[in-house]
Amino acid sequence: MILEQYYIECLSHASYLIGDEGTGRAIVVDPRRDITDYLADANRHGLTIEGVINTHFHADFVSGHLELLDATGAWIGFGEAAETDYPIRRLRHGEHIVLGEVDVEVLATPGHTWESISLLVRERPQAPPTAVLTGDSLFIGDVGRPDLANLGDGTTTDLARAMYSTLHDTLLRLPDTVTVLPAHGAGSSCGKNLSTELTSTIGEQRRTNPSVQPMSEDAFVALITDGQPAIPAYFADDVTLNKTTRPLLDQHRRIPALAAAGLRTELAAGTQVLDARTPDDFAAGHLTGSVNVGFDGRFAETGGMVADIGARIALITYPGQEQDAAMRLARIGSDHAAGYLNVDAATFPPELTDLVQAAPRTTAAELDRLLAADAVTLIDIRNPGERDVGVILGAVPIPLAQLRTQIGELPTDRPLVVHCAGGWRSSVAASLLRAHGLEHVSDLVGGYNDWAEHRATT
């Protein structure tokens, strides 16, 4: 049996290739849009990809089922409740997809969405199961949230109750030795306490996962509906893209370099500039109106928070990162990267000097002085669960994913300071606010963590 996991840190996303070495038949599960890895590995193992299965309608990325259909002619499978505008194979609970000796059993596991399924893998028919691909139902350390995409049929509470049944009546009844292979890991907005581990077992999750411990259904509903990360606005766009026929991703596309004149033209046309350098380099010098979304963080998801899907984007990157940055955006459906300008540290071309400015920043000590003088409005852009570790008194909580929609409600009678946990997201937020015309906005260097350490030593 071939069972390969493909994990990308930027989206905390796992996809899978399952194949039978004897027959050469294979399926791909929860694929991303750039499908070359699946095709290359299938070729290396002598496999033919005959089916592609999505465990549910993904909200945080655009699935590669249409790209795989185009490349291989594979059928596309979803749970029975799925509705699409392209032909699909409806997969029923208890149905077996036989690849040869390798057997894949479909388990209906609603809760994250109504059409959610899991896939139970056996190395041969009637053998004990080896692994279960749980999609966004059972994560390592958590379970899937019930409020992202309910297909307009039922409430979040209904889905949470369905998840309780999925866990206790289906997944936790599997043998303890079964390997758990979820669709997401730590950092994903599809849950709140996901582990950094990429695999586990049913037995280990039964012992250690807080969300599957013995509790009443009502207690479970309260647990998984509280403290979830704010939902990025682009999630709704990606659910729609995953239900409909859409343009295919060019697997070999290359975005062009932009000369200074070309970048000026893009700026004049209203093109959104995303600067993928570190917060420190961005603060030292950046183009007026650009938003800092560091390549070294959750670039794709955060890019979707600050720029609309479909918006025309120009990228500022370190040399060698430009094509990967464009591909990361394409994975969430943001296909309109117009080009890039490479900038090493803060060295912009001389022709753009008049557009370059530094970003104001605030240290923990300076923030304390400003707060004591009631001379600043502090915005806390962490997610609800993050604030459980502590808050800075007087901070206004607005998660980063919701900030763009609330810019018009922010006070402008005093300077704004924005903070997150460690300083990466606050640079995103402060630059976003300045790009939308707010003046006197700075980010807290080192975020809440540095502020808490400063307070502990003073």
Image (cartoon, rainbow, N blue to C red):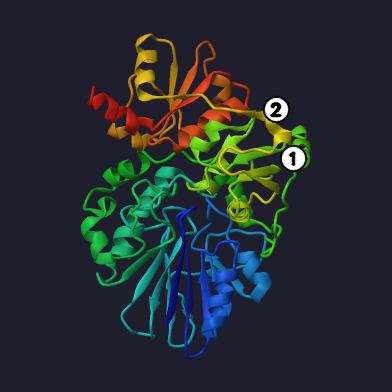
Return the disc, 2 or 1, that comes first in the chain's sequence: 1
Residue 402 in sight = no
Q: Residue at x 68, y 43 (%)?
A: 314
Q: Position of residue 260 (x, y in %)?
A: 74, 40
Q: Which residue is mark 1?
A: 260
Q: Crowding near pointer 2: few (<14 within 10 Å), some, many (20+)?
A: few
Compared to 303, does 289 lie above or below?
above
Q: Amino acid at mark 1?
A: Ala
Q: Position of residue 24 (x, y in %)?
A: 53, 86
Q: Considering the numbered disc 1 on the image, is that residue within a helix, a strand or a loop?
A: helix
Q: Which residue is mark 2?
A: 354
Q: Residue at x 47, y 84 (%)?
A: 20
Task: Specify the quadrant that holds the N terminus.
Answer: bottom left
In the visual, does 72 lie left or right of 206?
right
Residue 315 in sight = yes
Q: Crowding near pointer 1: few (<14 within 10 Å), some, many (20+)?
A: some
Distance Cα–Cα, label 2 vs label 1: 12 Å
Furthest residue to the top?
Answer: 373
Nearest the camera: 454 or 418? 454
Q: Position of residue 53 (x, y in %)?
A: 53, 68
Q: Amino acid at mark 2?
A: Asp
Compared to 420, does 194 lie above or below?
below
